[in-house]
Amino acid sequence: MLAQAVKPLVRLVDRYLPDPYIFVLILTLIVMAAAMAVEGHGPVAVIRMWGDGFWDLLAFCVIGTGSTTFAFFNLAIIAALLVVVPLVNRLIAAERAGQHLRRSRAAP
């Protein structure tokens, strides 16, 4: 029932809301333009700073907040890989089958 009620909203969002990647690109370009205008850096310097910032963020995750954040960061990337998703789905299906089997044995 809820799925039927939500379908028109999903169609509306799919039709008029662009892909989130577009927002990332637009915001990146806005920040690059602001850095060039306000700080007076050239486009190459801004791109270099943007690339170096990733490694600083990674170092912060490892050193600043401990290995837990680093582990979550890496596990999120690994979980998003297309190779891992079918494996995880098989593990979930096997666990559900095992739970069903245990319940049927326990039932009188």
Image (cartoon, helix red, strand yellow):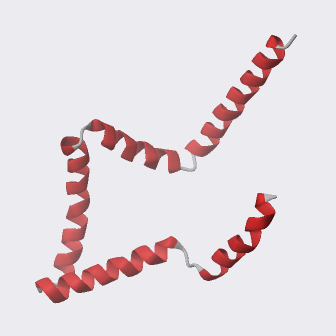
Q: Is residue 58 left or right of residue 5?
A: left
Residue that appears at 69% across and 70% down: 10
Residue drawn at x 56%, y 78% is 18
Number of numbered discs present? Answer: 0
Can you give x and y, in whole percent of width and height, for residue 5 in the image? 77, 66
Vertical placement of residue 98 versus 43, above or below: above
Nearest the eye: 60 or 81 = 60
Q: Is residue 87 above or below residue 48?
A: above
Q: Position of residue 101 (x, y in %)?
A: 79, 19
Front-most of residues 18 and 49: 18
Q: Which residue is at the far left?
A: 40
Q: Quadrant of the C terminus?
A: top right
Decide if residue 41 is in sight here.
Answer: no
Q: Is residue 83 above or below residue 2?
A: above
| Quarter of the image with the N terminus in it | bottom right
**Residue 30, quarter of picture:** bottom left
Q: Residue furthest bottom?
A: 37
Q: Would residue 107 be found to the left or right of residue 85 on screen? A: right
How far across and how far down the image is residue 33, in percent?
25, 86
Which residue is nearer to you in this view: 49 or 107?
A: 107
The quadrant in which residue 4 appears is bottom right
Q: Residue at x 24, y 69 (%)?
A: 50
The answer to whether one can see residue 7 in this image is yes
